[in-house]
């Protein structure tokens, strides 16, 4: 099992705002994958099954499902569901032992009713440990009238010791000083260490006793880990001040290698929007220390706002790092793929996945199967909704496409896997020969498809 777990109109951040600058890094090509040549796209038949509906909501959106697969092929799907003007949002887990043909009854994960922030940009994270452990991470939301948009988010971590049948309690991921936490991700390394990273917005109490933004402290990219199965977490560490405020943080982990990716802001001169490119910080000692962040590609994406998409990563059996991301760079906006064979020090020339004269910010994900084949899935909103020439978060409607990468070639399916327009693609996972994808349709249904018919 692989452990993982522009626009023209500026998007508005949902929680707290942020900014940044990093040192640039050189790039080279991997010996095992030549990305310097133009990549051909070879059409193949769609190898994914007919979509299966996992859940349906009639009252409110069920955005951002997530998925993981155990070493014995059991499928775990995590999703949010809420009811308007009632209990708020809850988090549910369903499982399948027959490759998604049927799913179990839902198990509520959050021990406190309604203690989940409904968010289509950030899926709740799920990882599997030893001895039937299931770990789940999400953000909750409380009302704070003087915070941005009137809300304050914290990270909640829950553990099941019976393979997801019960989640008896949960805990809050804390920092030394008050801070809102958001755009989080979680992953386990092969020794069971739990790695968590997120964007951190400092806050403080004002004279009236209300939480407000603390402008005397920088916004940061934070990291913590647990080495005792989630019973305790170490003191958090900052990987960088002032990251881009509203793009997803992603984590990948293998043996001793841990990677954290996020979108950074680079200075761009006076009266110009900041450059917002993706970076990765690397650890070779299982998260004890991290390198300075390295730019995946010098895209020089100028944008005065946030696009709400990150750079998912996976590690293959040889230790190579693979990543995909969106950029709105001038002349070639779209989604790209790159690799690193030296623990994230340098990255190969980006491979085009979906590039045109106009590609709005969209989600892209990847997984690596047991044969080290890279599978990529992405949203394509071309011609749909209001995304023809402009982009606003929340308007996303898209068809979902898949591809495999073989010897430097992107082998793309002929048709999308969904028959209706999706509103949220959030996860792809693989294990035991199964490659599975989950997404949300326009009618708020959670859908599942796999490469096993």
Image (cartoon, grey):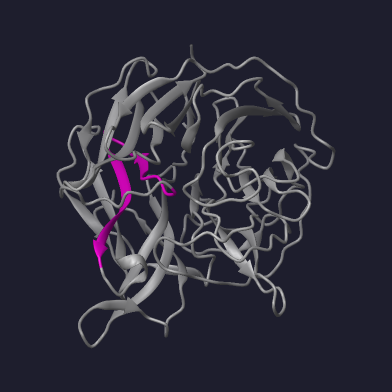
Percent x, y of residue 20: 58, 72
Q: Nearer the viewer, residue 360 or 259?
A: 360
Percent x, y of residue 361: 59, 48
Tally the numbered discs.
0
Q: Nearer the viewer, residue 328 or 162?
A: 328
Q: Residue furthest right?
A: 37
Percent x, y of residue 261: 55, 55
Corner quadrant of residue 67: top left
The answer to whether residue 349 is seen in the rendering is yes
Percent x, y of residue 376: 60, 33
Whether 351 is drawn above or below 246: the answer is above
| Image position of 275 (left or right of 386) | right
| Magenta region | 121-143
The answer to whether residue 372 is seen in the rendering is no
Q: Nearer the viewer, residue 231 or 54?
A: 54
The residue at the point 51 percent across, 54 percent down is 308
The residue at the point 67 percent across, 55 percent down is 296
The residue at the point 64 percent across, 55 percent down is 7
């Amino acid at each position: 099992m692989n452990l993982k777990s522009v626009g023209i109109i500026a998007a508005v951040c949902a929680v707290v705002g942020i900014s940044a600058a990093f040192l640039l890094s050189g790039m080279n090509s991997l010996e095992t994958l030549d990305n310097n040549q133009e990549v051909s796209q070879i059409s193949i038949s769609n190898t994914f099954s007919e979509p299966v509906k996992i859940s349906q909501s009639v009252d409110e959106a069920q955005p951002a499902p997530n998925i993981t697969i155990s070493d014995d092929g059991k499928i775990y799907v995590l999703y949010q569901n809420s009811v308007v003007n009632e209990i708020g949002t809850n988090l549910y887990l369903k499982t399948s032992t027959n490759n998604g043909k049927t799913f179990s009854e839902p198990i509520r994960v959050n021990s406190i009713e309604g203690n989940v922030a409904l968010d289509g940009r950030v899926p709740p994270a799920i990882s599997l440990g030893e001895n039937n452990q299931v770990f789940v991470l999400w953000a909750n939301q409380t009302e704070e009238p003087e915070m941005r948009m009137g809300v304050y988010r914290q990270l909640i971590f829950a553990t099941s010791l019976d393979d997801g049948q019960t989640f008896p309690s949960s805990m809050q991921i804390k920092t030394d000083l008050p801070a809102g936490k958001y755009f989080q991700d979680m992953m386990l390394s092969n020794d069971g260490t739990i790695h968590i990273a997120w964007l951190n917005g400092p806050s403080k109490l004002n004279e009236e006793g209300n939480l407000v933004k603390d402008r005397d402290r920088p916004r940061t990219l934070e990291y913590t880990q647990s080495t005792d199965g989630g019973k305790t977490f170490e003191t958090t560490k900052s990987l960088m001040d002032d990251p881009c405020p509203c793009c997803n943080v992603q984590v990948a982990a293998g043996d001793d290698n841990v990677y954290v990716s996020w979108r950074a802001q680079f200075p761009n001169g006076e009266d110009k929007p900041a450059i917002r490119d993706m970076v990765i910080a690397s650890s070779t000692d299982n998260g004890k220390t991290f390198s300075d962040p390295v730019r995946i590609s010098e895209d020089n994406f100028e944008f005065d706002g946030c696009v709400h998409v990150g750079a998912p990563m996976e590690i293959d059996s040889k230790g190579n790092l693979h990543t995909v991301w969106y950029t709105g760079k001038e002349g070639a906006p779209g989604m790209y793929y790159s690799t690193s064979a030296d623990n994230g020090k340098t990255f190969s020339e980006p491979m085009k996945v979906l590039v045109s004269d106009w590609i709005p910010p969209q989600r892209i994900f990847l997984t690596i199967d047991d044969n080290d084949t890279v599978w990529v899935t992405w949203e394509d909103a071309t011609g749909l909704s209001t995304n023809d020439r402009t982009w606003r978060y929340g308007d996303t409607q898209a068809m979902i496409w898949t591809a495999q990468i073989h010897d430097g070639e992107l082998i793309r399916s002929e048709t999308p896997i969904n028959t209706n327009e999706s509103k949220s693609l959030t996860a792809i996972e693989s294990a035991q020969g199964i490659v599975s994808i989950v997404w949300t349709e326009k009618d708020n249904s959670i859908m599942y498809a796999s490469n096993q018919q």
